[in-house]
Image (cartoon, helix red, strand yellow):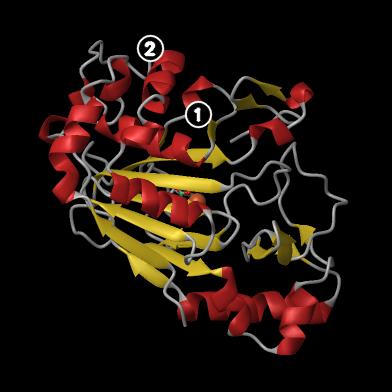
Amino acid sequence: MKSTITTIDCQKFTNQLLALAGRCRSNPYQDLDNFLLECHSLVQELPDELIHAIKHFSYKTNGGCLLLKSLPSDSKIYSFKYQEKYQLNSKSPRFFYSEIFLGIIGQNLGDVVGVEKRDIFQDVCPCPGHEMEFSATSSQVALQLHTEKMFHPYTPDFLLLSCIRPDRERKAETTIVNAENIYQSISKKHQDLLSSKIFYPKLDLPYIEQSMVYSVFYEYQNRLSIRFNVDFLTSPNSYANESLHQLNITVNTICESVYLDKGDLLIIDNRRCLHGRSRFVATYDGFDRWLQRIHVIEDLSSVPTKYKRDRFINYKKDKI
Ligand SMILES: O=C(O)CCC(=O)C(=O)O
Ligand SMILES: [Fe+2]
């Protein structure tokens, strides 16, 4: 089975990357537009090896997941409580390495999108009361393998996760599995059922049409793609429900795990891969695991003007 994850050690580029980051002079929380423009102007100035790896990834010829290890990070921000970042008056790039590399690499792949300004750089941290929920803010339960915003008409094409601080016990692993590998691992009967439009959403959000039917596997840009979350899909057909159950067993058996450390940035093709997370311990002392996430859409021009304002997509009372 082809591995889903391609890894590049970026430590050898540290000086070059620090010089690039030094050219970003805006505060992403005070002046988002200029900040993203500055990042955009640096897209072609990344080291050649990185540009090639990202291109290769965007041609969709690899497994659908690219791990950039050890990008520059700052020891000061490592000890920040994450809410403190928004109050920073500074424009110094050293506080914003995570946003800078998300901004540069994200815009290499397409357009960074959100529902509103505060959704562009999303902090992913454990949250008190959410320990057992199906949410990126859970901790005591594993986050099931899933597609990000799977019922959204403008599902993000890519998801970028940047690690500012790993969990103290170094247990939290991001799980990844690729659609091709899943498809090859299930029976013909389940391949056929899961490729049929016989599944309904089991989730109520304003942007979800409850009468829409979905298939789990689908073709997108001539490639096998997947949308899945075992808790969010159902079918009146008992064979179809059984296929969801089997699929869930398969994805959990064949998934790979990656431990994100400080400065690591994981790029996930949200249509070719599912992602999740193992369980871990949260203490809520302000120093828990801290990732930042962005959503990228390859072709923003495919979104009708009525649903967008610049990079903000708002589809029927959208919620992130
Ligand atoms: O915490 C992780 O490693 C992944 C969380 C997740 O699913 C997300 O941020 O979308
Ligand atoms: Fe997710």
Disc 2 residue type? Gln
The disc label shown at residue 119, or none: 1
Res. 195 in view: yes
Upstream in sequence: badge 2 or badge 1: 2
Which percent across, then down, holds residue 301?
69, 31
Q: Marks 2 and 1, Cα distance to the nearest angstrom?
A: 14 Å
Looking at the rendered structure, the secondary structure element under dot 2 is loop
Side of 301 where 164 appears, left or right: left
Vertical placement of 154 versus 308: above or below? below
125 or 77: which is nearer to us? Answer: 77
Vertical placement of 185 versus 19: above or below? below
Disc 1 residue type? Asp
Side of 218 where 139 appears, left or right: left
How many other residues sit within 10 Å of disc 2, few (<14), some (14-19) or many (≥20)? some
The disc label shown at residue 30, or none: 2
Res. 173 in view: no
Vertical placement of 287 versus 193: above or below? above
The image quadrant that residue 90 belongs to is top left
